[in-house]
Amino acid sequence: MESGRKKDRPQLAAALAGCRASRATLVIAKLDRLARNVAFVSGLMESGVEFVAADMPAVNRLTVHILAAVAEEEARMISARTKAALAAAKARGVQLGNPRLLARDPVASAKGNAVQVEDARRRAAVVLPYIERARRAGAVTLAEIAEALMARGVSAPRGGQRWAPAQVRRIMLTASQFV
């Protein structure tokens, strides 16, 4: 699931591309989760892809615009309330964030770093065989290896479906450190 506040939404872009290619209708679960930005919804409506919301299947274009405007304003108000509450808490002397993870606690920082290093090592060990297969199949550049990983359905380091060449490079560097 991707946030309706984000403008860069690769899953939605892929779904729209699939709908365009097959002239299908995009079905979304909830209209208010589609976007909290009137310009985005307007662009989607003008994109040529028909869409329907399962929670409001009978809405028309005007209603979609109105609901998008309401959702955009709601997001702005939520943001303002959150900022105000955090500022008030800070003014009362509340320390924001996890105090054990601050740089002032070197023991907690060292433990956190050790966990991250171990996770990276484990991840590299899982992905490295796929990288080696891609190389044996003729992939030479980091971009070609990234494409091969995506074609095989290997999830990217943070769980996404898209691999960037820099991510492939980091996996290879991590793996070489533990060989």
Image (cartoon, rainbow, N blue to C red):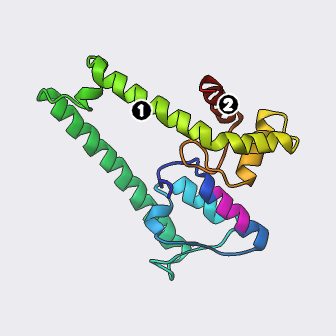
- Would residue 4 be found to the left or right of residue 78 on screen? right
In percent of the image, x 23 and y 31: which residue is there? Answer: 96
Residue 175 appears left or right of 60: right
157 sits left or right of 4 in the view? right
Out of 137 and 147, give the one closest to the viewer: 137
Looking at the rendering, the stretch of residues picked out in magenta corresponds to 13-18
The image shows residue 126 at horizontal and vertical percentages of 61, 43
Residue sitting at x 77%, y 47%: 148
Q: Rounded to the nearest whole Å, what is the CA distance between mark 2 and mark 1?
A: 19 Å
**Amino acid found under the numbered disc labelled 2:** Met
Secondary structure type for disc 2: helix
Q: Residue 25 lies in magenta, yes or no?
A: no
The residue at the point 53 percent across, 43 percent down is 158
In this orientation, which residue lies closer to the viewer: 55 or 73? Answer: 55
Task: Choose the circle earlier in sequence order: 2 or 1.
Answer: 1
Residue at image position (25%, 27%) is 100
The circle on residue 172 is 2
> Which mark is on residue 176?
none
Q: Secondary structure at mark 1?
A: helix
Q: Main secondary structure of the magenta part?
A: helix
Dot 1 amino acid type: Val
Identify whether 121 is placed above or below 20: above
Pick out the residue farthest to the left: 92
Quarter of the C terminus within the rendering: top right
Q: Position of residue 63 (x, y in %)?
A: 48, 72
Q: Nearer the viewer, residue 1 or 26?
A: 1
Q: Name the spot of residue 122 as percent of width and height, x first.
A: 54, 38
Q: Residues within 10 Å of mark 1 (few under 14, many from 20)?
A: few
What is the x, y in percent for residue 37? 49, 54
Please name the residue that numbered disc 1 is placed on.
115
Residue 20, picture quadrant: bottom right
Q: Are dots 2 and 1 in contact, CB under 8 Å? A: no
